[in-house]
């Protein structure tokens, strides 16, 4: 079934073309750990943006903390620019329920008040549970309801896989 | 109480933390989990908005049967940065003087829907007693009981050592001073052994070193210079003023001469050794100002890391993990 999944590296190039000229010259890209960070890194290079790349770890704002607790990880958000009054483009690999993006917005606003926030995603698989929409989308991807669309990074090469969700 | 029953009281059958009562018997994996989780919270305290919503809607009761403004405040800050509601009770001054028992006090607070108790008590074992009697899902953190344990202090010290030294398995660590009365020292010794410190030393006059402390796997030195030789970490303990007047010590001045840390004695440790102290310090009694404020001192970072470690413990106890 993963044969039908698109090539993420090609999607990154298409996404970059859609974003070129459509975002502010001083806009900042911020990738959501971990898949979004890989995508943001590539977009940042392709677009040649001057503002340094940021990354967000959203675990501290997740809404399922009470059920599953904290993941054990040492990832931290790194925002190496002033957020106030800047256009920020959040970048994620897969847009699904919208809950990760809700958490990412909360995390971002802990660093300041951006002028505007856009959303770029490599793949939109539908299934939204919150009113979240992407401004830039690489592709719409169909996967079964009981599957997760997962981006992996093997030796610097991005690849999509559809993985059965654990019960 | 045996070691294994303590472990089961604070660690569930699934290996998750239910209460934090002591570092004794706390599995190394769980200690590392707490330190890794604390990493995330160090950055929270560095931002504009020093708050995350993990414990929103939870009620945390600081129940201090023995007064300690400093420790209570660090727990309060940690809980507030996790968005919990914090209620401070100085119980020593109210209920107990009216004759209420420890458990009645706790059951009353539990009836107010407390989710977590932070307990300090002058009697060793009081937090264990409370942990055995609270409802399932209610967590107890020991904030210091008698001479027994002060696990969050022990863990923040482990965080500090890991931050500066990375790996425990090649370290020489010395704990200096009044080990006999120190719950901090006990919590440190258990945690350091669990994390695999190969050379752990205790330095102090025989009157202030517990009998048979060697059983815990430490080497005892009554000569400070010999004990400090080639140490990577020097942990000074607070000499409580009430001890100075007793029969255990001749005088504060005499103590400083033999066991106070000054630059000259510190020179026997490794050049990159770090100096720690749980606070509050007695300058000129256990530590010289030049060392306390010197380049090897990490005493203030300990305080900062302490908030993150307490946030980590509280967040782990406040969720299903």
Image (spheres, helix red, strand yellow):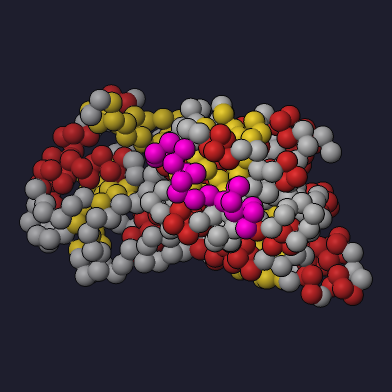
Residue at image location 90% in from the left, 69% down from the top? B100
Residue at image location 22% in from the left, 45% down from the top? A40
**What x and y, as percent, mark residue B4?**
77, 32
Seen in the picture, residue B164 relative to B244 is either above or below; the reply is above
Q: Quadrant of the N terminus of chain B?
A: top right
* Foreground residue among A159 and B278: B278
Q: Quadrant of residue A108?
A: bottom left
* Foreground residue among B172 and A29: B172
Q: Is residue B122 left or right of residue B225?
A: right
Q: Residue furthest right?
A: B99
Q: Is residue B178 left or right of residue B146?
A: left
Residue B235 seen from this side: yes
Residue B305 seen from this side: no
Confirm whether the magenta stretch covers residue B271.
Answer: yes
**What x and y, as percent, mark residue A113?**
29, 69
Q: Is residue B204 left or right of residue B292?
A: right
Q: Is residue B134 left or right of residue A23?
A: right
Q: Quadrant of residue B114?
A: bottom right
Q: Which residues are magenta?
A: B253-273
Residue at image location 31% in from the left, 40% down from the top? A35
Residue at image location 57% in from the left, 29% down from the top? B199
Confirm whether the magenta stretch covers residue A164.
Answer: no
**What x and y, as percent, mark residue A69?**
55, 47
Q: Quadrant of residue A123?
A: top left
């Amino acid at each position: 079934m993963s044969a039908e999944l698109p090539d993420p590296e090609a999607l990154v190039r298409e996404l970059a073309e859609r974003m070129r000229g459509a975002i502010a010259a001083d806009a900042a890209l911020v990738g959501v750990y971990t898949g979004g960070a890989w995508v943001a890194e590539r977009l940042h290079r392709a677009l040649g943006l001057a503002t340094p790349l940021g990354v967000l770890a959203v675990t501290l704002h997740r809404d399922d903390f009470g059920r599953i607790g904290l993941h054990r990880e040492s990832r931290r958000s790194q925002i190496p620019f002033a957020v106030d009054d800047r256009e920020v483009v959040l970048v994620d690999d897969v847009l699904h329920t919208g809950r990760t993006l809700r958490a990412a917005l909360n995390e971002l606003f802990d660093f300041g008040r951006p002028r505007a926030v856009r959303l770029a995603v490599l793949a939109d698989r539908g299934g939204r549970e919150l009113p979240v929409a992407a401004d830039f989308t690489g592709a719409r991807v169909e996967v079964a309801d009981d599957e997760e669309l997962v981006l992996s990074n093997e030796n610097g090469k991005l690849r999509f896989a559809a993985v059965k969700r654990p019960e | 109480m045996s070691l294994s029953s303590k472990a089961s009281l604070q660690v569930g059958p699934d290996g998750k933390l239910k209460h934090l009562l002591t570092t004794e018997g706390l599995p190394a994996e769980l200690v590392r989990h707490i330190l890794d989780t604390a990493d995330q919270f160090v950055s929270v305290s560095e931002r504009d908005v020093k708050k995350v919503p993990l414990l929103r809607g939870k009620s945390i009761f600081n129940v201090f049967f023995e007064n300690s403004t400093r420790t209570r405040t660090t727990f309060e800050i940690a809980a507030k940065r996790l968005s919990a509601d914090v209620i401070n009770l100085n119980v020593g001054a109210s209920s107990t003087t009216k004759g209420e028992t420890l458990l009645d006090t706790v059951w009353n607070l539990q009836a107010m829907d407390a989710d977590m108790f932070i307990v300090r008590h002058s009697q060793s074992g009081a937090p264990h007693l409370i942990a055995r009697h609270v409802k399932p899902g209610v967590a107890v953190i020991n904030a210091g009981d008698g001479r027994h344990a002060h696990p969050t202090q022990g863990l923040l010290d482990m965080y500090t050592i890991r931050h500066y030294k990375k790996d425990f398995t090649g370290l020489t660590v010395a704990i200096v001073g009044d080990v006999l009365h120190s719950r901090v020292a006990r919590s440190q010794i258990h945690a350091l052994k669990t994390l695999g410190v190969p050379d752990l030393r205790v330095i102090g006059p025989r009157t202030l070193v517990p009998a048979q402390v060697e059983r815990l796997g430490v080497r005892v030195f009554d000569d400070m210079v010999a004990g400090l030789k080639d140490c990577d970490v020097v942990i000074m303990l607070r000499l409580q003023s009430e001890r100075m007047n007793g029969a255990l010590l001749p005088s504060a001045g005499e103590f400083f001469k033999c066991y106070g840390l000054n630059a000259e004695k510190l020179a026997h440790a490794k050049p990159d050794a770090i100096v720690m102290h749980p606070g509050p310090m007695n300058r000129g009694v256990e530590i010289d100002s030049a060392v306390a404020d010197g380049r090897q001192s990490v005493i203030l970072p300990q305080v900062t890391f302490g908030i993150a470690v307490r946030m980590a413990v509280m967040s782990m106890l406040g969720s299903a993990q």
